[in-house]
């Protein structure tokens, strides 16, 4: 049993407990998720993707002017068809998001699916005419900001839980070690004292 606790202690000291991100950090992981989303949308829409460029889809890292967020235009009939095509195939993208989570942050899988679901809801409102392109873009960026914040909170929560786990295992290790040491000492006294008996308080033979 002591060997098991020794192994646990070594694992804790070497930091083998995993945090939220198992590959890269939050910035790297979210950028990769953004590329995953863009790639999936392009694969679904094919040539139709061009119809929504500059209105709903933008180049990675592009700084958007305020006019994009205040765009009062609503989708044309053809653009609505493209958006509905995107919505109806979101399950394909969700599989890609789960693959992203498995590679970068497994504990963020459910949060990422929620983020995707909220994006889809924004697409639905845009296709129904409830949102303009400006409102949809604002909603997508607000959702990304919300997702970023909750990833950070999830990371902090996981780190705090791991600290508590380390403390608990360390306590168990120390208790086990003391019990083991005590057992070994008593055992040695019994052997050394033979039939004379043992005083476990003074650690001497009678």
Image: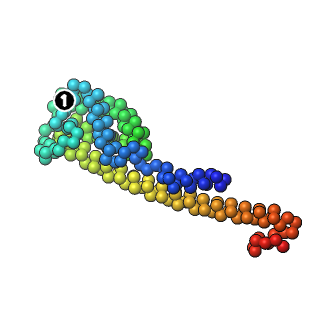
Residue 167 at x, y percent in the picture:
52, 60
Foreground of the two, 72 or 9: 9
Residue 55 at x, y percent in the picture:
17, 37
In the rendered image of this protein, does residue 203 appear above or below residue 70?
below
Foreground of the two, 125 or 100: 100
Q: Residue at x 32, y 44 (%)?
A: 28
In the rendered image of this protein, does residue 139 appear above or below residue 57?
below
- Total number of numbered discs in the rendering: 1
Q: Is residue 18 left or right of residue 4?
A: left
Residue 182 at x, y percent in the picture:
70, 64
Element carrying mark 1: helix
Residue furthest out toward the bottom: 202
Q: Is residue 111 left or right of residue 182?
A: left
Residue furthest out toward the right: 195
Foreground of the two, 178 or 191: 191
Task: State the residue position of label 1.
Answer: 50
Query: Split into 4 quadrants, where in the image is the C terminus?
Result: bottom right
Residue 50 at x, y percent in the picture:
18, 29
């Amino acid at each position: 049993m002591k060997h098991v606790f020794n192994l646990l202690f070594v694992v804790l000291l070497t930091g083998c407990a995993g945090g939220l991100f198992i590959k890269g950090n939050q910035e790297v992981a979210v950028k990769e998720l953004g590329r995953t989303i863009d790639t999936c949308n392009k694969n679904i829409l094919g040539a139709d993707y061009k119809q929504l460029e500059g209105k709903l889809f933008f180049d990675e890292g592009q700084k958007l002017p305020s006019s994009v967020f205040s765009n009062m235009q609503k989708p044309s009939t053809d653009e609505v068809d493209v958006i509905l095509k995107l919505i109806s195939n979101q399950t394909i993208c969700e599989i890609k998001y789960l693959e992203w989570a498995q590679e970068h942050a497994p504990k963020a899988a459910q949060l990422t699916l929620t983020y995707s679901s909220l994006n889809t809801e924004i697409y639905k409102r845009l296709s129904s005419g409830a949102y303009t392109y400006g409102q949809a873009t604002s909603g997508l960026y607000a959702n990304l900001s919300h997702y970023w914040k909750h990833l950070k909170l999830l990371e902090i929560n996981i780190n705090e839980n791991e600290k508590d786990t380390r403390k608990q295992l360390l306590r168990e290790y120390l208790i086990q070690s003391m019990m083991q040491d005590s057992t070994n000492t008593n055992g040695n006294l019994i052997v050394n004292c033979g039939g004379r008996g043992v005083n476990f308080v003074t650690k001497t033979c009678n």
